Amino acid sequence: MKAPILLLFAMYCTGTSLAFASGSQATDVKHGPAGIAVDEPLVSARSKLIKQGWKPTRMHTRDGYEYSGVERELAARDFLEVDTCSFDSSRCILFYSKKGACLRVDTMGEQLKDMTVTRWRNECPDAPSEPNSGDAG
C-alpha cells in the first residue's frame, strides 16, 4: 500500500517541477528565429529574418483595409507584412513565413526608426477576408 502512494507522490512532484521548469524556460528565451532578440530594432530583426529565408507575408492586399498612423509609415516603406498597429500603445504585429511555417513578430515604437521587437511566436495570420463577402458583422 505504501509503494503505490509513494509512486503517486513522486509522479506528482516530478510533474509539478517539470511544469514550473518549462514555464520559466519559456520566459528566459532571449533569441528567436534568425537570432532576433527582444529590444532589437525592427529594421535589424527584419533584415536577419529575410537573410535566413523568412519572407514578409503581405497583409491587406485585397480586403480594403486602410492604413493609418504607424501602419501607414510602415506600408510607405514597403513593410507590407504589417497586420495592425494599436493607436494607444504603439504596438504593431507583423507576419513572416518560411517553408510552410509562420512567424508573428510584435513590436513597440511610434516611428520605424524607434520600433523594437517585443516578442515573437509561431503563429499564422488569420485568413484574409474577401471584400464584400456579405458577412453581416
Image: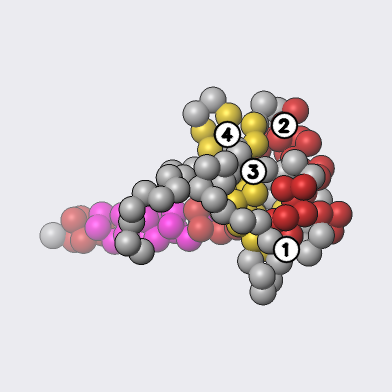
Visible in this render: residue 39?
no
Circle 3 residue: 81
Residue 83 appears at what percent x and percent y? Answer: 59, 51
Assign a secondary structure to mark 3: loop
Q: Is residue 69 above or below residue 83?
A: below
- Mark 3 or mark 2, whichever is nearer to me: 3
Taking the magenta stretch, the answer to whether it contains residue 126 is: no
Q: CA distance from mark 3 to mark 2?
A: 12 Å
The numbered dot on residue 50 is: 2
* Displayed quadrant of residue 78: top right
Q: Is residue 87 above or below residue 55?
A: below
Q: CA distance from mark 4 to mark 1?
A: 25 Å
Residue 41 appears at what percent x and percent y? Answer: 81, 51
Assign a secondary structure to mark 2: helix
Residue drawn at the location 75% of the way across and 28% of the way down: 51
Assign a secondary structure to mark 4: strand
The amino acid type of the residue labelled 1 equals Gly
The numbered dot on residue 110 is: none
- Mark 4 or mark 1, whichever is nearer to me: 1
The amino acid type of the residue labelled 2 equals Ile
Q: Earlier in the sequence, mark 4 or mark 3?
A: 3
Quadrant where the image shows the N terminus: bottom left
Q: Earlier in the sequence, mark 3 or mark 2?
A: 2
The numbered dot on residue 97 is: 4
- Magenta segment range? 7-21
The amino acid type of the residue labelled 3 equals Glu
Assign a secondary structure to mark 1: loop
Q: Earlier in the sequence, mark 1 or mark 2?
A: 2
Overall secondary structure of the magenta section: helix
The amino acid type of the residue labelled 4 equals Ser
